[in-house]
Image: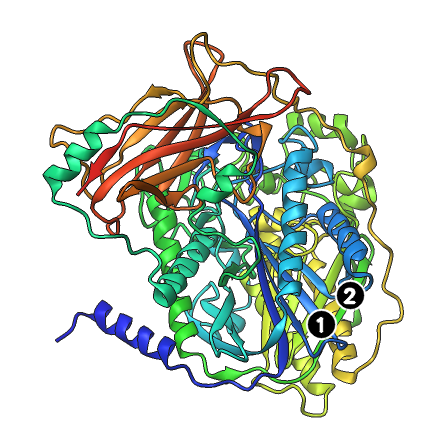
Amino acid sequence: MYPNHIIFLLFTLLIYVFPSPAISNYLIGVGSYDSTGPAAGVNMMGYANLDQSTAGIHFRLRARAFIVAENSEGPRIAFVNLDAGMASQLVTIKVLERLSKRFGNLYTEDNVAISGTHTHAGPGGYMQYVVYSVTSLGFIPQSFDAIVTAIEMSIVQAHQNLKSGSILINTGDLDNAGLNRSPSAYLFNPPDERSRYPRDVDTLMTLLKFVDGTSQKSIGAFNWFATHGTSMSKDNTLISGDNKGAAARFFEDWFTSTATNSTTFDAQDDINVLMEKATAIKATGGQPCGKTTSQGFKVRKNADGSKFVGAFCQSNVGDVSPNVLGAFCTDTGLPCDFNHSSCHGDDQLCIGRGPGYPDEIKSTKIIAERQFLKAVELFTSAKQQLTGKIDYRHVYLNFTNIKVSLAGGKSGITCPAALGPGFAAGTTDGPGAFGFQQGDTKINEFWKLVRDHLKKPSDYQLDCQKPKPVLLSTGEMFFPYAWAPAIVPIQILRIGKLVILSVPGEFTTMSGRRLRESVKQTLISNSDGEFDNDTHIVIAGLTNTYSQYIATPEEYKQQRYEAASTLYGPHTLLAYIQEFNKLAESIAKGLKIGNKGPSPPDLSSVQLKLLPDPSGELPPPGIEFGDMKLDVSVPKSGFFSKGDKPGAVFWSPNPRFDLLSEGTYAVVEMLQGKRWVAAYDDDDFSLIFKWNVDNGSSNGLATLEWEVPDTASSGVYRFRHFGSSMKTIGSTTEYFTGASSAFTVS
């Protein structure tokens, strides 16, 4: 009898090699581009931890896009999955400006969606509102430009690769990749509503498979599933796509290896011969190279967008954590307080544990693999083909004063943005400031004084936000510019019976369920049968801009983190449901939107930039950048085994001089005959690039660490490092490379 994983592999290969033919009914295209920002000294976006600044790369970030069109002249949509904490209004504005210059009115705010994966391990400084840029010391042009360019180029690739094809859809449950981190708040929802669902998190994954109409081979797959990008902790300083970025890398590599067997290397000599070869190969020393030289050492080359694109998109993630073992007190090891997620009153001691605890990289890998394996299962078994119209609706809403209908004939209104003390407490994924707890309904006098010094909330605001006590009235704060958004977009994209709801924030599990169900009922009741119970409704979270959380009115009463971060007051969810239903009705009836609402501000001209650029840098006397500081230390056995972690340290200046987009800072090369071939780069989960300043001087060091994968071939390897430097600020950028001594893997 075959082991289960062998049976699964055979099943996968059979379906891949002999796919069911699909009828081409759309134009489809996919694209992918490097969005990795500055890898040194830039605060990360997500945890708002002042001490968490980038110091290397775990693996690179990407923007992944798909375009679907009815035909060359008909309606089309473009969806971008971005390895970033969230979408940014300013990013969206500038991307659309660039697309307008390239394509005219083909891609606009109406039919383009930009959705963040919610990794908390990407560089910040790309948002335009103060509350989201204060920890990054304001606006960081390098972060911003990397993201804008990546989104633009991913859409350009998808557009240039448009071809006749079809889209298959499949759904399935993934039970072990998310846990509700605010279960006490979830219990505030009505018992009869909760009884309709088996769990307090959504387990459904929805996957689209894009199939080339000519070859019947897949060109890409995008899926939506709700779990936070917080497998990597608030103490991590390596740029990382977290579990969703890793799942995308695993999926794309799986597809490529299945399709082409591209990772196979030539057979090697016996171990003694290999060690003899390795011993004779010494470090090269630093050498000059070109700006784009490192691109030629990439293992996965995707310059024209021709590679398979696999994307793992975010959904109603608000209260869903990947730290599935639960939250425990770091001092006692006991479970945290249920209602406040604290330990004897201290929120900072309550930390969620991932499945690889205490190894956060292992936890990231496990949660990624769980999503990846479910996606492969859905991908290989997908049969249902999407057919029907491509359509879209988009409006801007002033969310500070939307009137909503309440029970009993009453009415309510949304409020200017505000944050409660539960926001300052943080979550079990990343605790916040000392002295706050989730569920706090009072603010002590000291923090009231601090608040009022910044901006005393108006009486209207205090009353409107109840029962949330106002810690920061961000919607009433405008110095030096707006602290929080007032104008936010909502959007619906339609591909036949798939409806994507683009939401500019993080809906909790129950909030997302209510929105999906309400929109689905509106579509069904207002159409002539185009929509029915088989219609798929997907929430695409953190899309087009960011306005924090959306809790249910019942969850809002407890004021845990998600409720305290629900900016526009207790009626926020009702307002979203009301306004999305207006868009849904217009789609069902085939009507256009008359008033698209007030446009959001472009605050690019007033952004503060407080983080200084790196100063010019020279290597130590007698040293060249790319020289070895510490060469590979070979074990007594003379070779490394699978699971070992060889490493090397190079003299290297600040990586902010050039991001090496679509290139690499780190490579593991394998000797093939007399030629070195790139086997792993800094887009691989197993190879880490770290950068820090040498403790004994002001010079920088690049550390390359490789955990030898179980799949690595036996052979002779070495590390190669790429980088760039400036002798003085504003001088010509110079590029270099250097390689370590060789070592053996068996």
Residue visible at 27% across and 38% down? Answer: 717
Q: Residue at x 40, y 64 (%)?
A: 255
Pointers 1 and 2 in contact (C-beta within 8 Å): yes
Residue linked to disc 1: 76
| Mark 2 lies on residue | 106
Which kind of residue does numbered mark 1 sit on?
A: Arg
**Residue at the right extreme, as displayed:** 594
Residue extending farthest to the top is: 621
Q: Is residue 487 left or right of residue 199?
A: right
Q: Could you tell me which quadrant the C terminus lies in?
A: top left
Q: Nearer the viewer, residue 577 or 661?
A: 661
The correct choice, above or below, for 236 with respect to 702 in the image is below
Q: Is residue 2 shown left or right of residue 250?
A: left
Residue 107: image location, x then y, percent: 75, 63
* Residue 307 appearing in the image: yes
- Judging depth in this view, the residue of 112 and 608 nearest the camera is 112
Residue 511 occupies quadrant: bottom right
Q: Residue at x 32, y 74 (%)?
A: 13
**Type of the residue with mark 2:** Leu
Count of numbered badges drawn on the protein? 2
Determine the image quadrant of residue 501: bottom right
Q: Which x, y percent locates residue 149?
A: 66, 47
**Does label 1 or label 2 sit earlier along the sequence?**
1
Where is 259 relative to 654, above or below? Answer: below
Q: Residue furthest front?
A: 674
